């Protein structure tokens, strides 16, 4: 028996999207995150024809880190907008998958009848926060890595003692391990990144809401220079998320029945499809390997299958691009061609990287593209933490016949079942090992500051070893591309500070 028609009151659609970039020169006159969120939602309200904010049943906010003293901001935002939605929620942390998760939850509330109008929003003002701090400190903006700053004052754990503290330290482990697994040379891996990022710069150049709108050549992106300094091998500044932005974005979800009742034209409605979520262990050393992610695979494949779609049915994608390894892995999972753009925003380098809220910009940009007739079906993939949280969803310009709400988007059991054994972490081991992955960290001067190796001992246990900046021979071995370091052997000996020191046994 065929499925009965879905009531329009149970079909979630996006009716309004809004984005804001605040480039105010005076940091004390610039908007804080609450004000940015308010402006983004006012813009979304206007985009949807007006009158939506006053009718909100649900307001969901992506956590922000640039002005921590304002948290929790969801109540302050409601006050600033003059609204009192019954459901108010703020994520516990600013994860890159947060907007997609919140969109799926909003769609479920619409589909279950718990809400009629819902909004999702987020913003960061790290550029303003840094400039205000610089003014207070006499011109010194300090460490620009906001995620690393958050860990200061805490006793370091095992991985942090070896320098694996912020996402920028961890994602290169995936880049280097995946490149080796794919059989690429360093030059080939960097060339793939360069072409992908150059394509995103072209998208950003055409996107009025992108933070950086200058088109960049692939060679300029991969070549380290004074203006494009190395960050963590093999990544340069133009390959990583640009968090020094003041950006806000949000969107409004309602039912098809409510949208029609309010006179929203059919060609401005974007239908919310099913999503799929799965995560890896929060402990980055408790991962099966660093060449793939079952959570990512199950999320992407699960979203396609839940909507009754194949990749051939997808016209546009937004594959999260905090670091190159993420869209590289994602496009291979779904079979997205290398010569097609992986972003409609411009990526987190050029579009802007407002910590956990980038995918709200992606939702807004995708709605605009679908409305314009550039495609019928779109796949959006968000990734958060340390390659930890994965959430995908489909948006469409026409109803998706396989979709029913509410639905369970949690695919964790499938990811866990697909995952292989996780190696034991042996913090006390010293001796011979084989490199599983690695990276080199760099100072703002462009000079190597340290290296770290993730290795396996002969029993298969995983352990960490450091490389001193003074050991230029090993730094060069890890980074010059003449030999693929992954899979090579070495000896880890205990140093005076208690850390293991890696010494390659390969010339």
Image (cartoon, rainbow, N blue to C red):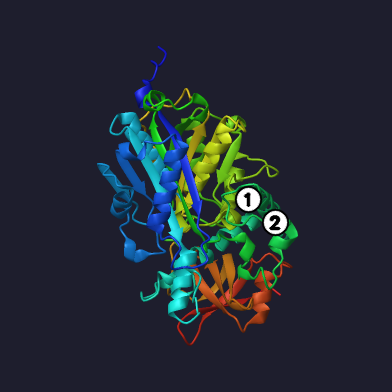
Q: Secondary structure at mark 1?
A: helix
Residue farthest to the bottom, as pictured: 496
Give x and y (percent) for residue 437: 57, 64
Quadrant of the frame with the N terminus:
top left
Residue 101, by quadrant, is top left
In the picture, the disc for residue 410 is none
Q: Is residue 337 left or right of residue 67?
A: right
| Location of mark 2 (residue) | 194
Q: Is residue 410 left or right of residue 459?
A: left
Give x and y (percent) for residue 412: 40, 44
10 Å crowding of disc 2: few (<14), some (14-19), many (20+) = many
Q: At 55% across and 38% down in the image, what residue appears? A: 368
Give x and y (percent) for residue 290: 54, 57
Q: At 43% across and 62% down in the image, what residue appears? A: 424
Quadrant of the frame with the C terminus:
bottom right
Q: Is residue 325 left or right of residue 221?
A: left
| Location of mark 1 (residue) | 204
* Residue 473 shows in the view: yes
Above-or-below relation of 442 to 368: below
The one of 270 and 406 positioned closer to us in this rendering: 270
Q: Secondary structure at mark 2?
A: helix
Number of numbered discs visible in the structure rendering? 2
Above-or-below relation of 311 to 329: above
Give x and y (percent) for residue 98: 42, 49
Q: At 62% across and 33% down in the image, what residue appears? A: 374
Mark 1 or mark 2, which is nearer to you? 1
Instruction: Tell me if label 1 and label 2 are in contact, CB under 8 Å.
Output: no
Q: How many angstroms separate mark 1 from mark 2 (CA)? A: 15 Å
Above-or-below relation of 362 to 23: above
């Amino acid at each position: 028996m065929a499925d009965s028609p879905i009531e329009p009151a149970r079909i979630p659609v996006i009716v309004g999207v809004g984005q804001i970039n605040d480039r105010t020169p005076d940091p004390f006159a610039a908007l804080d995150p609450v004000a940015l969120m308010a402006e983004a939602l006012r813009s979304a309200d206007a985009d949807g024809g007006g009158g939506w904010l006053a009718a909100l049943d649900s307001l969901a906010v992506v956590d922000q880190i640039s002005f921590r003293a304002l948290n929790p901001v969801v109540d302050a935002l409601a006050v600033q907008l003059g609204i009192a939605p019954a459901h108010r929620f703020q994520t516990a942390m600013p994860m890159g998958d947060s907007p997609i998760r919140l969109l799926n939850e909003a769609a479920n509330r619409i589909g279950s009848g718990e809400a009629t109008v819902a909004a999702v929003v987020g913003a960061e003002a790290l550029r303003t926060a840094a400039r205000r701090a610089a003014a207070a400190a006499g011109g010194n903006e300090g460490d620009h890595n906001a995620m690393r700053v958050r860990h200061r004052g805490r006793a370091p754990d095992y991985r942090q003692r070896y320098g694996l503290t912020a996402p920028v330290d961890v994602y290169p482990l995936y880049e280097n391990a995946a490149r080796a697994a794919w059989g690429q040379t360093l030059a080939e891996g960097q060339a793939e990144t360069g072409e992908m990022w150059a394509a995103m710069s072209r998208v950003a150049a055409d996107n009025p809401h992108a933070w950086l709108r200058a088109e960049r050549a692939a060679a300029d992106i991969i070549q380290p220079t004074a203006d494009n300094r190395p960050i963590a091998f093999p990544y340069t500044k133009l390959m990583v998320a640009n968090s020094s932005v003041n950006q806000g974005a949000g969107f409004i979800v309602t039912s098809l029945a409510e949208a029609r009742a309010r006179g929203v034209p059919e060609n401005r409605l974007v239908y919310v499809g099913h999503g799929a979520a799965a995560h890896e262990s929060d402990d980055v050393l408790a991962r099966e390997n660093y060449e793939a992610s079952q959570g990512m695979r199950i999320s992407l494949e699960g979203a396609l299958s839940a909507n009754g779609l194949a990749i051939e049915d997808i016209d546009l994608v937004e594959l999260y691009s905090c670091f190159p390894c993420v869209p590289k892995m994602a496009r291979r999972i779904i079979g997205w061609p290398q010569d097609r753009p992986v972003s409609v925003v411009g990526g987190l380098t050029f579009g802007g990287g407002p910590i956990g809220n980038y995918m709200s910009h992606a939702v807004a940009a995708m709605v605009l593209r679908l409305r314009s007739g550039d495609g019928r079906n779109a796949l959006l993939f968000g990734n958060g933490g340390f390659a930890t949280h994965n959430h995908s969803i489909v948006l469409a310009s026409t109803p998706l016949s396989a979709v029913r709400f509410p639905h369970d988007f949690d695919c964790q059991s499938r990811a866990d079942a697909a995952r292989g054994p996780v190696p034991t972490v042996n913090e006390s081991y010293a001796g011979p090992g084989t490199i599983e992955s690695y990276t080199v960290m760099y100072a703002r001067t462009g000079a190597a500051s340290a290296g770290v190796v993730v290795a396996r001992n002969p029993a298969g246990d995983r352990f960490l070893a450091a490389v001193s900046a003074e050991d230029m021979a090993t730094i060069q071995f890890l980074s010059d591309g003449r030999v693929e370091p992954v899979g090579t052997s070495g000896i880890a000996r205990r140093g005076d500070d208690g850390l293991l020191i890696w010494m390659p046994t390969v010339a």
